[in-house]
Image (spheres, rainbow, N blue to C red):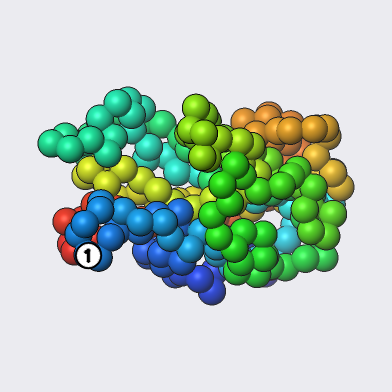
Amino acid sequence: MEDIFRAWSDSFADGQRIPEVYAFAKIDPSGKEHTLPAGDRNPEISWDSIPAGTQSLILLCQDHDVPADFSKANQEGEKIPVDAPRTTYNHWVLVDISPEVSNIPAGYLSNGITPHGKHGPACANGMRQGLNDYTDSFKGDPQMHGKYYGYDGPCPPWNDERVHNYIFTLYAVDFPMLPLQGDFRADDVLEAMKGHVLGECSIVGTYTLNPELKKAK
C-alpha cells in the first residue's frame, strides 16, 4: 500500500484553535482594548511520504474567511454576519523547500511582529519567502507599512461572527526552484506551479478575536 503524503503540526491539532503565540493579535484579557499584539511565531509544520519525483516543496497559509467588504471590520457597533461574502487572505508564502527537509520548526522563520515587515525574499537554507497580504493591509500606516515577507499570523476582525480557518497547504512540485525572480505573491506561485504539482496535503487551524465566539469554542 502506497504511503500518503500528509502534513501535521506539533503547534496545534488539525481543525483546532491556533494558540495565540502563533497569531498576530490576541484578545485583550483586561477588556481595556479589543485586541493586543500576539506572539506571531510561525507554527511548526511537519510532513512525510512526499511523492516520487518531488524536487521541491511549497507551503502556503491562506484564510478564505476574510470579509470581502472590510469597511465594517473592527468598527464599534457593527457586526460582520456569518453569511457575509468572503475572500482570501494570504498569511504565508514559502517556496524552494528541499525535499530532504521534513519540517519547519516553530519560530524558525517568524519569531515576533516585525514593523515594516521581515526581510526577503531569501531566507534560511536556500528557501525563499513571498509577500503576504499584510503588505496591503498596512499601506498608508507610517508605523507599519512595508513589504511583509514570509509568515504573519491570524488577525481576524474582532467583530466577525465567523470563526476563521487557516489552511496550511504543502505542494510537492517537479522543479527544484520556483521559476520566478524578485518579489512574488501567492497568486503568482499558484500560477507558476500549474502542471507541476505531484501532490498536496493540508492542515487547518482555527482562530477568532471575537470574545463570544471564543467562549463558545
| Residue underneath mark 1 | 30
- Is residue 97 visible in this depiction of the protein? yes
Q: Is residue 56 left or right of residue 44?
A: right
What is the quadrant of the N terminus in the image? bottom right
Q: Is residue 62 above or below residue 208?
A: above
**Residue closest to the eye, 212 or 112:** 112
- Is residue 52 visible in this depiction of the protein? no
Kindly identify the residue that appears in the image at 74 percent across and 33 percent down.
Answer: 183
Kindly identify the residue that appears in the image at 74 percent across and 44 percent down.
Answer: 120
Q: Is residue 156 left or right of residue 141?
A: left
Q: Is residue 46 left or right of residue 213?
A: right
What is the quadrant of the C terminus in the image? bottom left
Provide residue 104's location: percent of width, then percent of height: 67, 65
Q: Is residue 152 above or below residue 136?
A: below
Q: Is residue 165 left or right of residue 1?
A: left
The furthest residue to the bottom: 10
Kindly identify the residue that appears in the image at 41 percent across and 67 percent down.
Answer: 19
Provide residue 155's location: percent of width, then percent of height: 40, 48
